[in-house]
Image (cartoon, helix red, strand yellow):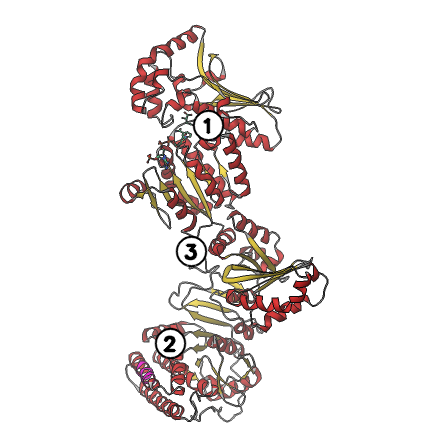
Amino acid sequence: MKGCVLGLIAPEESKTVHSLPQGESWSVHKFGGTCVGTCERIQNVADIVVADPSQRKVVVVSAMSKVTDVLYHLVEAAGSRKESYIESLNLLLQKHKETARALLVEGADLEKFLAKLEDDIRNLQAMLRAIYIGPVSGHATESFTDFVVGHGELWSAQMLCAAVNKRGLSAAWMDAREVLVVTPTSTNQVDPDFASSETRLFDWYARNPADTIIVTGFIANTPDNVPTTLKRDGSDFSAAIMGSLFRAANVTIWTDVDGVYSADPRKVSEAVVLSTLSYQEAWEMSYFGANVLHPRTTLPVMKYNIPITIRNVFNLSASGTKICRTTYESTDDEFRAADSVVKGFATVDNLALVNVEGTGMAGVPGTASAIFEAVKEVGANVVMISQGSSEHSVCFAVPEKEVKAVSKALEKKFKRALDAGRLSKIEIVPNCSILAAVGQKMASTPGVSATLFDALAKANINVRAIAQGCSEYNITVVVNQDNSAKALKAAHSRFYLSRTPLAVGIVGPGLIGGTLLDQLKDQAGPLKEDFNIDLRVLGVIGSKKMALSHSGLNLSNWRSTLKEEGEEADLEKFTAHLCCSHPIPNIVVVDCTASSDVPNWYYPWMRKGMHIVTPNKKANSGSLDKYLRLKELQRKSYTHYFYEGTVGAGLPILSTLQGLLETGDKIHTVEGIFSGTLSYIFNNFHGQKTFSEIVKEAKAAGYTEPDPRDDLSGMDVARKVIILARECGLKLELDDICLENLVPEPLRGCENVDEFMDKLPEYDQAIAARREQAEESDEVLCYVGVVDVLASQGRVELRRYPKSHAFAQLSGSDNIIAFTTARYKKQPLIVRGPGAGAEVTAAGVFSDILRLASYLGAPS
Ligand SMILES: NC(=O)C1=CN([C@@H]2O[C@H](COP(=O)(O)OP(=O)(O)OC[C@H]3O[C@@H](n4cnc5c(N)ncnc54)[C@H](OP(=O)(O)O)[C@@H]3O)[C@@H](O)[C@H]2O)C=CC1
Ligand SMILES: N[C@@H](CC=O)C(=O)O
Ligand code: NA
C-alpha cells in the first residue's frame, strides 16, 4: 500500500507504458479463505501456482479464513466502545506472524513482511482508538470499515507472494486498490469501471512487469480513490474482473468441493459433479443454493468467453466443473448428446403459496400489478409466480416467514373486491417447497417436463403449482415440504443417474422370503452396475423379530442380524420406518407370509404410497368385497400391486392372462394343474412309494404350503382358481368353488402340522385304492382346477386322465395351464413348468420387484 492516508489509496503517478505483454495468455486462479487458512494450506496453494504450466499467471487471494469476520467485528467493537477490539487485533497479529514464520522460516522476505504487518497493526490500532474515543459511538464510516477489513487480503497476498518466490518463481503482489476501480450502486453492489481499471493496470504493470502476480481479492477503490470492497463473494468477482482485464485464457476458482454437483450431495448421496455448465445454467444453479459462483461474478468473463473452472484445492485429481459458453450450439452430435438435458436439481424449503382467486380478475388489466404492489409494500420476496391463461387465479410463492404480512396486505388492498365477490378468496398454502430442474438443453428437448412429472407421480408426490419461463432454463414445481427430500431424490435419480433406488421391506423371511433375500444379495451388485437399479432392503420382519436399517441391511448376514440383533416384531413400527426414515422415493413391501392378517396392512401401505409385491394368495382370494376395495385403492393411490407368485409360482401365468385381456382377447376357460405339490405327488404315485411318503418329500422339497393340508385339501388350488377367475372379471367367492378334499376327515382337526404328518400314513390305503382303479383303465389321477369364464364358474377336482393326455405327461412339481380363448380356440395357449419350490417362487417375486422398478423408470 502506498501511503496510509485514511480512506485514500491513490495509484502511482501515471507513466507511459500502456499494455500487457502480448502472445502467451494469462491464467487466473482464485483461492478462497479456507484454501489459505493455515501455513500448510498456503504452502499447498503456492505449490499449485508453481505447478501451473501457464507462462503468465494472476493469483487472486482471499484473507485467511475468518480474518475478514474478525476485522468487521473489531471495527464494530471499537465503534461501540468495547475494548475487545485491542485483543482481537492482537490475535490477528499473532496469527499472521506465526503463519509467516512457519511459512518463510527466515530471510529478508520474512523480515519485510513482519515489519509491514506490525506497521499495519499499529496504524489500525491508532485509527480504531480514534473511533473508540470518538464523541459519537458507531462512528466508523463505510469507507473506514472497508479500509480496515481489506487488510486480511493484503496480508495473505503478501505471504503467498513470498511463499511463491521462495519456490523460485518470481512473483509480484498487487494491492488491487491501486488497479480496480468500481462505482458503488444504490443496491449495495458495485459496478466495475473497466476502462479506468485497465488504464491503471497498464500503469501498474509498467512498474511491476512480473509473469506471476498475486492480487488481493475482495478490495478495490472508488473512482475518487476511496477504499471499498466488492461485497458478497467479492474475491470471486475480483478474479472474474482480473480475468477480463488480463483477457485470460481461463479462470480457476479453487475451493473445497470437487465442483458443482447435480444436487446437494447432503440430500442426494448419488449426486455427481457436473463436468460443464453454461453461464446461464450456473446462474440458475446458484440461485437455488448450489455451490456455484454468484451470477454477477460470471459477467466480466462472459464478455470474452473466458471459461471458469471450479476445482477442489484438496483434491487435485478431480477435474472440477467448467462454466463456459453454451456447448449446446455445438454441431458435434456426440458432444451434444453427452450433455445431460437437466443439469441439476435443487429444493428451496420454508415457502408458502398464496393463491388469489376470483372471476373478477379475468380480463381486468392491472390485477396482477395490484397484487404484486401489495407484496412489494410489505417487502416480501416473490420466489415464483404462476397464472393460468383463464386468469381466474394468480398463485405465487413467498418465504413462509413473510406470508402473514403478504396475506394481510392483500386482504386490505382487495377488501372491496372480496366483499363484492369479485375475488372469491386469498388462500395461503403453508409448508411448501420448490423443486427446480435446471438445464439449458431442456429448451430444445421434448418430454423433459413429462419425465419430471412422471418421476414425481411415481413417487406419489402431489404437485401444487408449476412455473416455467419461456427460456426453459428452469422448471419449478411446488410440493408439500414433507415431500421435498423425496421429490429431489425421485427427480434426480430419474434424470441424472438413471438409477432407480427402491427401498424394500420383506415381511416373512421364511422359505420363500429367505430365498428371495439370498437372491437379492447375489444380484444387488449387478443390478446396480448393469441396470442402474439400486435395491436396498431397509427392513425384514417375521412373526417374532424384525431388523431395520436406514441405509440397507447387509444381506450377507441378514439371518444372524435378525436372530442376534433383531428387535421385537412390530408391523406398525416397521411401516413407519419403511415409509419415513429415509429419503428413497419409492418403497415396496414384499409380503412373503401365508398370513391372512398381513394383507390387512396392504390398505395403509397403499395409502402411504408404498407398492406391494406378494406370493401370498390370501388377499386376492379372500372376501370379494375386500379384494375389490383393495384393487380400487391401488388404482386411486397410484401404487403398484404385483402378485405373479400367487399362481404357478415363478411361471408367467398372471402376466400371460393380463396380456391376453389387455389386448382384447376373450377368455373362455383357464384350466390345468395349479398345484406343484399335488402335481409332484401324483407324478410320483406309481405304487412303489406310499402317498404319505410322497407328501413328506413334497414338503421337504419346499413345494407345500407351510401347512400341507392347504394343498391336500384343494384349498390352495381353489385360491388360485379364484385369483384367476377374478382377474377374468368373475365376481366369485372362495365358497363358490366346489372342491374335493384329499385330507382324511379325521386329520382335518389336527392341532399342528407335525401331528398331521405323523398320522397321515394311517390313511394311505384309501388313496392307493383310487390310484389302482385308475391304473386298471390305463389312466392317472390329476388334481385340476378350472375357471369356466363363459359359465361364470370355478371348479377344483381330482380327475382321471388317459396316460396319453398332456396333463399326464408332467414331472416334478410341474404346473400346466391351458388358456382357451377367442383367439386360442383350436389349440389352447399352454404354459408349463415347475410351479412350486423356493428358488423358482422367489425368482418370480424378484421378477415382480424388477417389473416395479421398470415401471418406476428403471431402464428396460
Ligand atoms: N413354496 C412355494 O413353492 C410357494 C409358496 N408361495 C407362497 O409363499 C408364501 C410363503 O411361503 P413359505 O416361505 O413356504 O412359508 P414359511 O412358513 O416358510 O414362511 C412364512 C414366513 O412368514 C412369517 N410370518 C407369518 N406370519 C407373520 C406375521 N403375521 N407377520 C410377520 N411375519 C409373519 C413367518 O415368520 P416366523 O418364521 O417368524 O413365524 C415366516 O418367516 C406363502 O403365502 C405361500 O403360499 C407361493 C408360491 C409357491
Ligand atoms: N404349495 C403351492 C405352492 C405354490 O403356490 C403348490 O404346491 O403349488
Ligand atoms: Na406365476
Magenta stretch, main secondary structure, is: helix
**Disc 2 packing (10 Å; few <14; some 14–19; many ≥20):** few
Q: Amino acid at mark 2?
A: Lys
Give the structural element (helix, strand or loop) at label 1: loop
Q: Residue at x 39, y 39 (%)?
A: 507
**Disc 1 packing (10 Å; few <14; some 14–19; many ≥20):** many
Counting from the top left corner in percent of width and height, residue 149 is at 42, 83
Q: Of marks 3 and 1, which one's residue comes earlier in the chain?
A: 3
Mark 2 vs mark 1, CA separation in Å: 69 Å
Query: Can you see residue 332?
Result: no
Give the structural element (helix, strand or loop) at label 2: loop
Tell me the residue that label 3 is attached to.
269
Query: Can you see residue 760?
Result: yes
In the image, which disc is placed on residue 648?
1
Determine whether label 3 and label 1 are within 8 Å by CB.
no
Question: Ligand 3: does it lie within 8 Å of the C-beta at label 1?
Answer: yes
Mark 3 vs mark 1, CA separation in Å: 40 Å
Q: Of marks 3 and 2, which one's residue comes earlier in the chain?
A: 2
Q: Is residue 59 above or below residue 388?
A: below
Q: Residue at x 51, y 48 (%)?
A: 460
Give the structural element (helix, strand or loop) at label 3: loop
Q: Is residue 94 magenta?
A: yes
Question: Ligand 1: does it lie within 8 Å of the C-beta at label 2?
Answer: no
Q: Is residue 704 above or below residue 420?
A: above
Mark 3 vs mark 2, CA separation in Å: 29 Å
Segment tinted magenta in the rendering: 87-95
The image quadrant where one finds the N terminus is bottom left
Tell me the residue that label 2 is attached to.
66
Q: Amino acid at mark 1?
A: Gly
Q: Is residue 646 magenta?
A: no
Q: Amino acid at mark 3?
A: Ser
